[in-house]
């Protein structure tokens, strides 16, 4: 165990953790903005309630995405100074652009949205939220373009042992980035859609007085069911169907861009593709194993080359080629991790999308019966709760596949991970920061979970949200109305 | 081009210290300015809508250093490893404290959030000064004095900001806190600032003097209840201090490293210049608009 190992663990822990919150920020932000837009256009109160309800969940989560993101911006310099010095000229540019063009937009306009409910005209207030969520999505583009460059470096030359950018446009339109950005952003929408589906499923059960497990009522939930939520019977149906549509469409984009990524992998990172299948030798008509021992012949070739007879390079043969090209070293990533994360990603992701398609069919409008929609079945409401863990696991597995599969390189073909670490940072220092971050993150994860569950259980606010008309405020305390509402 | 980007980065740090300076001060003073929960909400309400946007100045400064001077970025952050780590930890607990404060239920949880806000404000406010003090002089004394300077000035700056943005008892307390903070900040500033220009260019002597006199002026203005001008003065003082520090760092951003050695190639700097010149005025415009939207003083919440 040396500083390199701990630095890698730290990067893995902090980045995976950061990315538990980011997809929700990306996808849920758009979802909430959509709800608020629907409210503004239709004036229906249940849209406003949903906006505030999911808006609050969005903000609880947003905080975590922001603070864990700070670590990322510093970590390259702290633990990976050799890497930073080598790539800064190229890799730093998208990071700087991300902060300048995306983070300012996101944080400034979100502040305006949170505190601007009573202070800004409705349209401008909504525009602030849209500006903030555009910022979030833009930041995803820049950071993924930077990440794609590590896997498939373009638009640069190496001068005096440092990468020098020659073409920013090439970096920003890297084929790897153009496949990866829609893949990750759409996957974030699947996660966010799954989150809404799960929350809605839970609320439906609760308001029917049912528990998460069949056959067991929930005494407190029964009580909850008597509250006058039924005045707005369509509310959860609306949020559910919107989330199902979002998840299903995003799922199709994930699949399409994933297909594209697979083909780029064959050209750009043959080792990762081979490792994902555990393919030892170059094989024509390479099979895909659904699990070890259950192989579908030719499927991997079909997926990666759109040709069931195409040759896929194998781990051992790529190793031999890399040794010839880059000198003797171990070029093989952790095979079991890469193999299994590939399957978890595909399997859990497809399960989520399948669930959303099933839900769309179950909740379809029935015009023939006078438009009266059938209630969401209890069993499906229970199934909905799975829509939170499934895509979350899939997206984490996707990152493990992507980044562990890139090893031993930080920059494919240019810089190895072992040569990227900060030479002046000691084992003890990394151990301290790794330990503190892990503990702190663990505590914060529990806190965030408790907060989210509590707010979901409490449900949307019951009194009409636009209570306290201006006239209710005593005339002399005119400024009192201007106090930012800290309810959010 | 290298010089230009050095100035851009100095400008970003200046924006960060001026803006988040008062956020830190407000956070640090939270328990001292409040007698009740309504007071605390009033105090935090002054920075509620803006603190996150202010923090992005840091992220942008760091990102710009990464892109324009990779060796400076990596050398600074790996060199001040544990200090930077503590800054980040502070920013984490402060960020979740501020965001979650309005969403927790029990008093104990609110108190925990407040503890996070106070710790996460005091720690970075001290450490940034300590880091730059150490960077300039490399001595333990400079580290401590630098930290004392940045913390005390941030507290003063934050107190003036609260006085400017509130009414009633909180405003009166903030004014007293500002005067008390000045008792610490002014001597430290007068004791330390003149020594900073030492090996820097001549003009840094001027900015150091400006920093000290603006601080003194700020205190006088608070005394005279001219809070708007007092805030302008403390902001000027922080900006002038930052300019002084970066003026000295110009010749050697890190010991043994010149700016030219640390810099990215001209192509990268040129491209970033164009994008920065287009985007930065927009950022400044919409952040200024935020302050305009929330320009009214805050009274204690009625409900």
Image (tube, coloured by chain):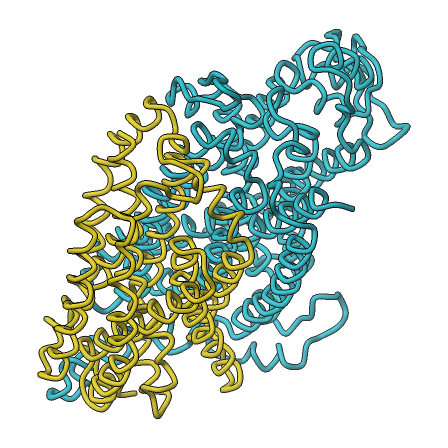
Chain colours: A cyan, B yellow
Q: Residue furthest right?
A: A293
Q: Reply above or below: A125 against A215.
A: above
- At 29% from the left and 49% from the top, the residue drawn is B199
- Please name whichever residue, B301 or B164, is drawn nearer the observer in this view of the structure: B164
Question: Horizontal and vertical percent for residue A139?
Answer: 41, 41
Q: Reply above or below: A359 against B178.
A: above
Q: Is residue A107 left or right of residue B167?
A: right
Question: For the C terminus of chain B, which image quadrant?
Answer: bottom left
Q: Mark yes or no: residue A366 visible.
A: no
Question: Horizontal and vertical percent for residue B39?
Answer: 31, 86
Q: Is residue A228 left or right of residue B183?
A: right
Question: For the N terminus of chain B, which image quadrant?
Answer: top left
- Please name whichever residue, A328 or A256, is drawn nearer the observer in this view of the structure: A328
- At 21% from the left and 83% from the top, the residue drawn is B299
Q: Mark yes or no: residue B267 visible.
A: yes
Q: Is residue A390 left or right of residue B240?
A: right
Q: Reply above or below: A428 against B27.
A: above
Q: Residue furthest front?
A: B198
Q: Is residue A202 left or right of residue B8?
A: right
- At 30% from the left and 53% from the top, the residue drawn is B245
- Please name whichever residue, A309 or A361, is drawn nearer the observer in this view of the structure: A309
- At 56% from the left and 28% from the top, the residue drawn is A150
Question: Horizontal and vertical percent for residue B205?
Answer: 19, 55
- Please name whichever residue, A150 or B151, is drawn nearer the observer in this view of the structure: B151
Q: Reply above or below: B59 against A301.
A: below
Question: Horizontal and vertical percent for residue B282?
Answer: 20, 44
Among the 4 quarters of the image, the one containing residue A300 = top right
Q: How many marks?
A: 0
């Amino acid at each position: 165990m040396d500083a390199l190992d701990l630095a890698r663990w730290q990067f893995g822990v902090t980045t995976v953790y950061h990315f538990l919150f980011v997809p929700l920020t990306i996808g849920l932000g758009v979802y909430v903005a959509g709800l608020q837009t629907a409210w503004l256009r239709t004036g229906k109160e249940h849209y406003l309630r949903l906006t505030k309800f999911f808006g609050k969940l969005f903000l609880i989560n947003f905080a975590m995405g922001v603070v864990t993101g700070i670590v990322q911006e510093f970590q390259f310099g702290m633990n990976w100074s050799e890497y930073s010095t080598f790539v800064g000229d190229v890799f730093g540019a998208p990071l700087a652009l991300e902060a300048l063009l995306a983070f300012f937009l996101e944080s400034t306009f979100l502040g305006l949205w949170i505190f601007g409910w009573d202070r800004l005209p409705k349209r401008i207030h909504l525009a602030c939220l849209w500006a903030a969520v555009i910022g979030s999505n833009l930041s995803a583009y820049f950071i993924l373009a930077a990440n794609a460059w590590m896997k498939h470096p373009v638009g640069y030359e190496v001068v005096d042992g440092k990468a020098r950018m020659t073409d920013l446009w090439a970096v920003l339109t890297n084929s790897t980035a153009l496949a990866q950005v829609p893949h990750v952003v759409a996957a974030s929408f699947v996660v966010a859609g799954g989150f809404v589906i799960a929350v809605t499923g839970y609320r439906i059960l609760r308001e029917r007085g049912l528990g998460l497990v069949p056959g067991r009522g929930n005494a407190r939930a029964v009580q909850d069911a008597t509250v006058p939520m039924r005045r707005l019977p369509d509310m959860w149906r609306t949020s559910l169907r919107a989330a199902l549509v979002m998840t299903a469409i995003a799922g199709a984009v994930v699949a399409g861009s994933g297909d594209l990524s697979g083909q780029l992998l064959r050209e750009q990172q043959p080792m990762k593709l081979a490792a994902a299948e555990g393919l030892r030798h170059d094989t024509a008509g390479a099979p895909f194993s659904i699990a070890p021992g259950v192989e579908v012949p030719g499927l991997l070739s079909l997926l990666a080359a759109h040709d069931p007879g195409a040759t896929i390079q194998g781990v051992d043969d790529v190793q031999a080629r890399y040794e010839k090209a880059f000198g003797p070293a171990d070029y093989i990533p952790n095979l079991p991790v890469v193999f299994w994360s590939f399957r978890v990603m595909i399997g859990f992701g497809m399960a989520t999308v399948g669930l959303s398609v099933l839900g769309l069919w179950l909740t379809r409008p029935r015009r023939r019966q006078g438009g009266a929609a059938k209630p969401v079945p209890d069993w499906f409401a229970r199934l909905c709760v799975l829509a939170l863990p499934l895509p979350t696991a899939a997206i984490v597995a996707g990152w493990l596949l992507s980044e562990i599969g890139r090893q031993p390189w930080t920059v494919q073909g240019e810089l190895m991970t072992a040569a990227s670490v900060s030479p002046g940072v000691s084992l003890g220092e990394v151990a301290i920061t790794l330990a503190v971050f892990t503990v702190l993150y663990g505590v914060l994860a529990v806190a965030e979970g408790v907060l989210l569950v509590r707010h979901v259980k409490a449900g949307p606010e019951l009194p009409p949200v636009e209570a306290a008309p201006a006239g209710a405020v005593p005339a002399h305390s005119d400024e009192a109305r201007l106090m930012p509402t800290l309810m959010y | 081009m290298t010089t230009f980007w050095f100035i851009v980065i100095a400008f970003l740090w200046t924006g960060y210290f001026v803006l988040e300076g008062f956020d830190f001060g407000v956070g640090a003073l939270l328990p001292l300015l409040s007698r009740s929960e309504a007071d605390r909400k009033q105090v935090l309400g002054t920075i509620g809508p803006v603190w996150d946007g202010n923090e992005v100045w840091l992220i942008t400064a760091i990102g710009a250093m990464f892109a324009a001077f990779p060796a400076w970025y990596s050398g600074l952050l790996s060199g001040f490893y544990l200090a930077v780590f503590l800054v980040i930890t502070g920013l984490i607990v402060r960020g979740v404290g501020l965001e979650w404060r309005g969403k927790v239920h029990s008093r104990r949880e609110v108190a925990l959030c407040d503890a996070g806000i106070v710790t996460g404000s005091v720690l970075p406010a001290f450490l940034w000064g300590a880091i730059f003090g150490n960077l300039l002089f490399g001595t333990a004394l400079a580290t401590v004095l630098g930290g004392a300077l940045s913390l005390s000035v941030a507290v003063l700056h934050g107190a003036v900001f609260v006085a400017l943005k509130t009414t009633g008892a909180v405003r009166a307390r903030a004014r007293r806190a500002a005067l008390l903070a000045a008792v610490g900040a002014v001597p430290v500033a007068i004791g330390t600032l003149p020594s900073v220009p030492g090996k820097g260019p001549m003009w840094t002597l001027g900015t150091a003097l400006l920093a000290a006199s603006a601080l003194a002026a700020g205190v006088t203005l608070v005394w005279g209840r001219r809070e708007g001008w007092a805030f302008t003065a403390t902001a000027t003082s922080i900006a002038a201090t930052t300019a002084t520090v970066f003026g000295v760092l110009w010749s050697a951003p890190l010991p043994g490293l010149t700016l030219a050695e640390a810099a990215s190639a001209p192509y990268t700097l040129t491209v970033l210049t164009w994008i920065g010149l287009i985007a930065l005025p927009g950022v400044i415009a919409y952040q200024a608009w935020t302050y305009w939207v929330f320009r009214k003083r805050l009274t204690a919440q009625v409900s």
